[in-house]
Image (cartoon, grey):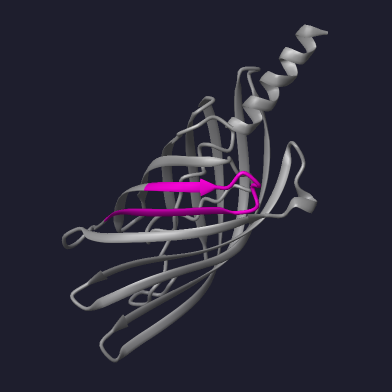
Amino acid sequence: MRRRHAWARMVAAALLASTLAGAATAQIVGVPVLQNAFVNPGVTLGANFAASSDALVYAGAVAWVPENEKIQLSGGFGVFDPEEGSGLAAWGARAMIPIRALETRTVGAALFAGVGNLSRGGATETRIPLGASVGYRGMLGGKRAISAYLAPFVDVSRFKHDSVSERKTLFRVSLGVDVAIVNQVGVTLGYEWGARAPEGSPGPAGGLFGVGVSYALRRP
């Protein structure tokens, strides 16, 4: 009986740990929309790297979830480094609400909305993703946890410079995998693809690849 209880506690801890990796994400321009469907109570810190055909992004983020686990708020700041020109400061924020009626120990769903912004010389580009996420989590090799999720969303991007303003709405999808190395440390890999913005228009012009490492300040 004791062995059974110990095994059950280990599984529960590992499943909760599988939410750590993707927790500290924010909607920074140039970073894929990697949103898991599960949450981890408390504060989680993350470091993110993203790459596309025309830019690299280096960023840090923090996520917070209250004890009732009804919402996740995240924010981040980073450097958008285009293929041509100097690096630009970029920031982003996102809110996620789990759908409790659909969440089980292994399957979950959530709704999310975010905003990201970067500017240079009076020109500003803003990205607003609105969508949903469906995720699955389980054990990996008996000691580690893994979580995979799919997030379809609508991406609304806007460019503004003085009196010139242009908006583009695209349908995109992201796929992510979170792996819990230990209870408080996780790694995320993900890719975003879908409709592309025409040349000269705001919005993603191709696929976005992202990788991140996160650390939970306190255990779930």
141 vs 167, left or right, is right
Residue 171 or residue 87, whichever sits in front? 87
Reply above or below: 66 against 93.
Answer: above
Residue 168 or residue 131, whichever sits in front? 131
Most distant residue in the right direction: 1
The structure residue drawn at horizontal position 61% and vertical position 27%, both measured from the top left corner, is: 145
Most distant residue in the bottom direction: 163
The structure residue drawn at horizontal position 30% and vertical position 59%, both measured from the top left corner, is: 54
Residue 60 or residue 163, whichever sits in front? 60
In magenta segment, residue 5: no
The structure residue drawn at horizontal position 51% and vertical position 44%, both measured from the top left corner, is: 23
Res 126 quadrant in image: bottom left
- Main secondary structure type of the part rendered in magenta: strand
Whole-percent x, y for residue 150 in the image: 62, 50
Residue 129 or residue 72, whichever sits in front? 72
Whole-percent x, y for residue 113 in the image: 55, 64
In magenta segment, residue 68: yes
The structure residue drawn at horizontal position 73% and vertical position 15%, both measured from the top left corner, is: 7
Q: Is residue 178 visible?
A: yes
136 vs 120, left or right, is right
Magenta residues span: 61-79
Reply above or below: 219 against 80.
Answer: above
Q: Is residue 196 visible?
A: no
